[in-house]
């Protein structure tokens, strides 16, 4: 017989090997694309019960050819210099055992800077993410009426699990206004 597939699933990848995937049903397959609603978003990583690990969120600008130069990244050490101008603003470094770091993004402004992608990653300095709860994603900031991080208006998130200290979490395709799920764990900085 005929099978109907909702067009919302056209850009969701089907895993061919789940042995390297994150645990649970809340982790979309690597390569899946999720449409972004709104023009301003807040990307985030939040954690619970991280002890003796400093989780740090970072953003990297990539052009349409895949190039990224030394000055095209933002992290806890340079966010105060506003390397992406006012189109991407970083919350600052959070070293608490239960906390969050986030980057507010104006999608059209970042696209007008001439970049195609923004890649979001986080690092666990002095430890790995296998013994704590770590969640990353984005929320619609258009209607967000708070200056501090608040879990309301979350559009997309997934739990990160792995015996690793580095995660390339997701990217934003500024041309198509989509999240691209990466969920790649690595032990190298």
Image (tube, helix red, strand yellow):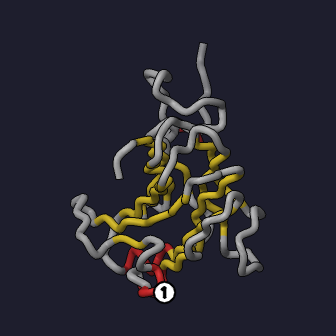
State the residue at coordinates (28%, 66%): 63
Q: Relative to 46, is 68 on the left or the right? A: left
User: In x, y percent, where is residue 150?
Assistant: 75, 68
Residue located at (44% from left, 21% from top) = 17
Q: Looking at the picture, how far across and down is residue 86, in whole percent?
A: 48, 86
**For residue 169, side relative to residue 144 (left or right):** left
Q: Residue at x 41, y 73 (%)?
A: 74
Q: Nearer the viewer, residue 178 or 50?
A: 50
Residue 51 vs residue 76, the one in the foreground: 51
Residue 152 in which image quadrant: bottom right
Quadrant of the rendered structure where residue 46 is?
Answer: bottom right
Q: Position of residue 20 (x, y in %)?
A: 46, 27
Residue shown at the point (55%, 58%) measured from the top left: 55
- In this orientation, which residue lies closer to the viewer: 150 or 144? 150
In this view, 44 is above or below 17: below
Reading the image, the residue beneath label 1 is 86
Q: Is residue 101 above or below residue 136?
A: below
Q: Is residue 7 visible?
A: no
Is label 1 in a helix, a strand or a loop? Answer: helix
């Amino acid at each position: 017989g005929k099978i109907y597939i909702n067009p919302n699933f056209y850009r969701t990848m089907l895993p061919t090997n789940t042995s390297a995937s994150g645990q649970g049903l809340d982790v979309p397959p690597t390569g899946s694309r999720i449409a972004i609603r709104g023009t301003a978003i807040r990307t985030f990583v939040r954690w619970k019960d991280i002890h003796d690990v400093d989780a740090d969120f970072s953003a990297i600008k990539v052009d349409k050819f895949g190039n990224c130069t030394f000055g095209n990244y933002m992290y806890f050490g340079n966010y105060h210099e506003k390397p992406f101008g006012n189109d991407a603003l970083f919350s600052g470094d959070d070293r608490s055992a239960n906390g969050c770091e986030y980057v507010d993004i104006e999608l059209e402004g970042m696209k007008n800077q001439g970049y195609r992608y923004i890649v979001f990653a986080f690092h666990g300095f002095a430890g790995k993410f296998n013994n704590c709860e770590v969640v990353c994603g984005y929320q619609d900031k258009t209607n967000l009426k708070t200056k501090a991080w608040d879990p309301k208006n979350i559009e997309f998130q997934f739990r990160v699990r792995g015996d690793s200290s580095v995660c390339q979490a997701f990217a934003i395709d500024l041309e198509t206004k989509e999240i691209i799920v990466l969920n790649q764990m690595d032990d190298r900085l």
